[in-house]
Image: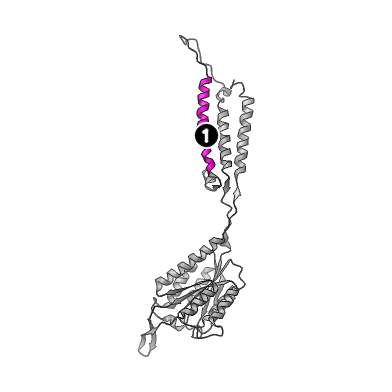
Amino acid sequence: MLNLFKSLEFAHPGFFWLFVLIPVMIAYYIWREQHLQGTLSVSAVKGFALPKKSVIARMRHLGIVLRVLCISALIIALARPQSSLSWQNTTTEGIDIVIASDISGSMLAEDFKPNRLEAGKEIAIDFIKNRPDDRIGLVVFSGESFTQCPLTIDHDVLINLYQDIKNGMIEDGTAVGMGLATAVNRLKESTAKSKVVILLTDGSNNMGSIPPVTAAEIAKKFGVRVYTVGVGTNGYAPFPFQTPMGIKYQNVPVQIDEATLNKIASITGGKYFRATNNQSLKNIYERIDKMEKAKIDVTQYHKKTECFLPFAIAALVFLLLEFLSKNTFLKGALT
């Protein structure tokens, strides 16, 4: 019974105040019974043997019990119990997300630890693990772009493919527009409630046949929201160079085209973020995670099932039992 009430909600809980009538009713019944019983005074009780009460006599209070049960069931029915177990779980529709990651040579800069590319992989993988209900895909770009993993719910496969990406897989450069266009192409046929691209880059578009703003307009046409992330510290970042004497480091200027990334996000209804270290990038993924969950929650709906009928029927049954008992086998005991 306790588990039953844990799964119920009540549309009109104010009716539970009517339960205060039950102790009043019981108190009146006791008072009435005491005043209906006659008293007899005798000088001696010898010879007065107490007769054994019959089963029917012992059941003379059954009427008040049935009446209390009837009123209790009726109050619960009036409070309109509703089952909350029938809520629809919209997470089954999920969100389709494509992560578009820059893997150009500049992503090897070590203002992130161990570098921008590896830090981005590690933090993105944690993001993927926290969204088991979503289809997620991966696009990588440098001088051109390609799909490393199509949209999938098999996140183990996705994570393995993500771990395999490295600089040098494709021609160097930064084709932001091509990377975004490839990601949108993976989402254009999606029927998910929310279609999202998370675009990470540390530079400005200098390769590819599709300008970033054109790719953003295409994304808008297909209802794809783009979150852009500029990856790189402010000022200069240490970059490793291979020399005959081994790896040497040189501070290179960080040049992120924030104006274009802001415009892409604005056109598509997304948001631009700037990550300057590992923790700030992790915080950005957490913010995107919460923002997308909030958007799904807004569209969530549920269907409640009315459960008052069993209680109303129970009240009717208790009322009929009281009426029948009072006019049949208890009739003699009550007179």
Q: What stretch is highlighted in magenta?
A: 14-39
Vertical placement of residue 58 versus 282, above or below: above
Residue type, mark 1 in image: Leu
Magenta stretch contains residue 15 = yes
Vertical placement of residue 193 versus 235, above or below: above
| Figure quadrant of residue 329 | top right
Magenta stretch contains residue 309 = no
Q: Where is residue 303 in the image (x, y as percent from the top left)?
A: 60, 54
Q: Is residue 292 left or right of residue 309?
A: left
Vertical placement of residue 259 versus 129, above or below: below
Residue most extreme to the top:
43
| Figure quadrant of residue 251 | bottom left
Given residues 235 and 104, the one toward you in this image is: 235
Residue most extreme to the bottom:
244
Q: Position of residue 149 (x, y in %)?
A: 55, 74
Residue at the image point whose x is 54% and y is 75% from the top:
267
Residue at the image point whose x is 59% and y is 51% from the top:
304
Is residue 229 in view?
yes
Q: Where is residue 274 in the image (x, y as percent from the top left)?
A: 44, 74
> Dot 1 corresponds to which residue?
21
Q: Which secondary structure class fits the magenta region best?
A: helix
Given residues 194 and 1, the one toward you in this image is: 194
